[in-house]
Image: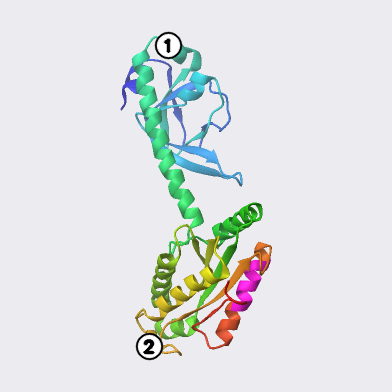
């Protein structure tokens, strides 16, 4: 229980809020402060799709809604009882009259809000990280890669820079899964992901493109530089002893890759990916465990 809560406890009037009842909605006018005496509240904020998201859970001993009363603005979040709650409601005018003469409590309020903001910032960062990464491999996911590719191509046009991508596929991965099972296949996906991540240059975007396909986005890389990175990745995978790799058709677990370069091969993200995909399957058609970079490396 914080000092602000204790000092405010004699004020206002007591009441009960039933589970599931909304005390106020996001955007509502800040006309009161609530002291949560018993129970828990969900603090809600609308997602881009309009669905409510629980930012955090408020517990007994907390002061809620005070900032909107102080600045006269709208509520930044909604409040819904998660359980039956006992509360004290203090009207904004009564709260402001009390707090105006208590600079020490204003300092306590500032510390409480600072702690909340830090906690929410950590949560937002964690949620953002989860939204842009692949859960299994911890590489960036397809959606983030596509967004970054569009942005980097826009920047490349303005700066007259090159952009290269390398699309990789694990050779005969279905055969590996059929022989060793999906859990073993997932281990391979994680291991290959780590090799690709460590091979990419600093600042490159390494992503899981889907299934057993991966992609590296290399800003400023020429065809020759992209091919060198791709070849290094291919060689590292080939030289790694994966569990059960000797049962693969090539006697080892390997990858193939296709390189595509902006602006020489294509000038849009869609076309660049198509070129990389065609070259990837050309590499696989020519025996696998190889990189196809198209034209002469330059």
Is 12 part of what is drawn in magenta? no
- On the image, numbered disc 2 is attached to which residue? 246
Looking at the image, is 276 positioned above or below residue 15?
below
Label 1: few (<14), some or many (≥20) within 10 Å? few
Asked if marks 1 and 2 touch (Cβ < 8 Å), the reply is: no
Q: Quadrant of residue 109?
A: top left
Q: Residue at x 58, y 71 (%)?
A: 298
Q: Is residue 241 left or right of residue 224?
A: left
How far from the left and from the top, in percent, is residue 151? 61, 54
Main structural element of the magenta stretch: helix, strand or loop? helix
The magenta segment: 271-279
> Which sits in the foreground, 253 or 244?
253
Looking at the image, is 15 positioned above or below residue 236?
above
Is 276 part of what is drawn in magenta? yes
Q: Quadrant of the N terminus?
A: top left
- On the image, numbered disc 1 is attached to which residue? 100
How far from the left and from the top, in percent, is residue 254? 45, 81
Q: Tell me the element at label 2.
A: helix
Q: Tell me the element at label 1.
A: loop
- Alpha-carbon span between mark 1 and mark 2: 76 Å
Q: Which is nearer the N-term, disc 1 or disc 2? A: 1
> Which sits in the foreground, 73 or 267?
267
How far from the left and from the top, in percent, is residue 221? 54, 64
Label 2: few (<14), some or many (≥20) within 10 Å? few
- The total number of labels drawn is 2
């Amino acid at each position: 229980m914080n000092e602000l809560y204790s000092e405010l406890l004699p004020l206002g009037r007591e009441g009960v809020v039933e589970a599931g009842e909304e005390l106020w909605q996001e955007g509502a006018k800040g006309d009161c402060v609530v002291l949560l005496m018993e129970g828990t509240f969900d603090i809600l904020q609308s997602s881009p799709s309009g669905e409510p998201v629980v930012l955090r859970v408020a517990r007994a001993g907390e002061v809620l809604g005070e900032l909107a009363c102080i600045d006269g603005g709208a509520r930044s979040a909604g409040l819904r009882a998660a359980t039956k709650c006992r509360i004290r409601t203090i009207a904004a005018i009564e709260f402001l009259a009390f707090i105006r003469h208590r600079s020490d409590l204003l300092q306590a309020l500032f510390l409480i809000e600072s702690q909340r903001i830090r906690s929410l910032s950590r949560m937002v960062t964690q949620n953002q990280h989860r939204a842009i990464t692949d859960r299994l491999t911890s590489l960036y996911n397809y959606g983030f890669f596509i967004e970054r590719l569009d942005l980097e191509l826009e920047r490349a046009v303005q700066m007259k820079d090159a952009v290269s991508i390398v699309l990789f596929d694990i050779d005969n991965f279905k055969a590996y899964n059929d022989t060793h099972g999906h859990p073993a296949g997932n281990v391979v996906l994680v291991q290959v992901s780590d090799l690709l991540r460590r091979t990419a240059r600093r600042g490159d975007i390494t992503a899981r493109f889907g299934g057993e396909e991966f992609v590296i986005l290399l800003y400023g890389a020429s065809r020759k530089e992209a091919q060198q990175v791709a070849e290094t990745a291919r060689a590292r995978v080939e030289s790694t002893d994966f569990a059960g790799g000797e049962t693969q058709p090539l006697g080892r677990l390997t990858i193939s890759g296709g390189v595509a370069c902006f602006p020489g091969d294509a000038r849009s993200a869609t076309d660049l990916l198509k070129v990389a995909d065609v070259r990837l399957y050309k590499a696989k058609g020519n025996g696998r465990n190889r990189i196809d970079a198209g034209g002469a490396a330059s």
